[in-house]
Image: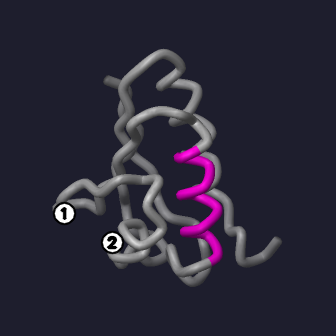
Amino acid sequence: MATRTVTIAASHGLHARPAKLFAQAAKESGLDVTVAKEGGSPVNAASILGVIALGANTGDVVTLEATGDGADAALDALAALLETDSDQA
């Protein structure tokens, strides 16, 4: 199992747009990926509703986990999405 700890960079947290981009990328990875806010329960990273329900704001720390072939590369890509402020794009 691969794991990454990431700080949310989006200036408005994981609201609709960044959550959609993240969930879509998680789904396209083809892996079982979860994301959990520090101290919270993990949710399916491919679920936009689950990601939004985390209530992750700017500066919050989340943990990503994935299993399967290519898990490290997938988590690197997903971490990069969370560490980029897509609200400024």
Task: Give the answer, above or below, for where 30 lies relative to 82.
Answer: above
Q: Position of residue 56 (x, y in %)?
A: 39, 73
Q: Residue at x 37, y 60 (%)?
A: 61
Viewer-proximal residue, 24 or 88?
Answer: 24
Q: Residue at x 18, y 59 (%)?
A: 41
Label 2 vs 1, first from the N-terminus: 1
Are the residues at dot 2 and dot 1 in contact (C-beta closer than 8 Å)?
Answer: yes
Task: Give the answer, above or below, for where 8 lies relative to 74.
Answer: below
Amino acid type assigned to the residue bearing label 1 in the image: Gly
Q: Main secondary structure of the magenta part?
A: helix
- Residue 50, label in figure: none
Q: Which residues are magenta?
A: 17-27
Q: Residue at x 58, y 26 (%)?
A: 73
Find out whether residue 57 is within the magenta segment. Answer: no
Q: Quadrant of the C terminus?
A: bottom right
Image quadrant where residue 43 sits: bottom left
* Residue marked by disc 1: 40
* Residue marked by disc 2: 54
Question: Relative to 72, is 86 on the left or the right?
Answer: right
Question: Relative to 48, is 18 on the left or the right?
Answer: right
Q: Position of residue 79 (x, y in %)?
A: 55, 46
Q: Position of residue 11 (x, y in %)?
A: 61, 79
Circle 2 — which element? loop
Find out whether residue 22 is within the magenta segment. Answer: yes
- What sort of colour scheme is used for the picture? one colour
Question: Relative to 19, is 59 on the left or the right?
Answer: left
Q: How many marks?
A: 2
Determine the residue located farthest toward the top in the rendered image. 69
Amino acid type assigned to the residue bearing label 2 in the image: Leu
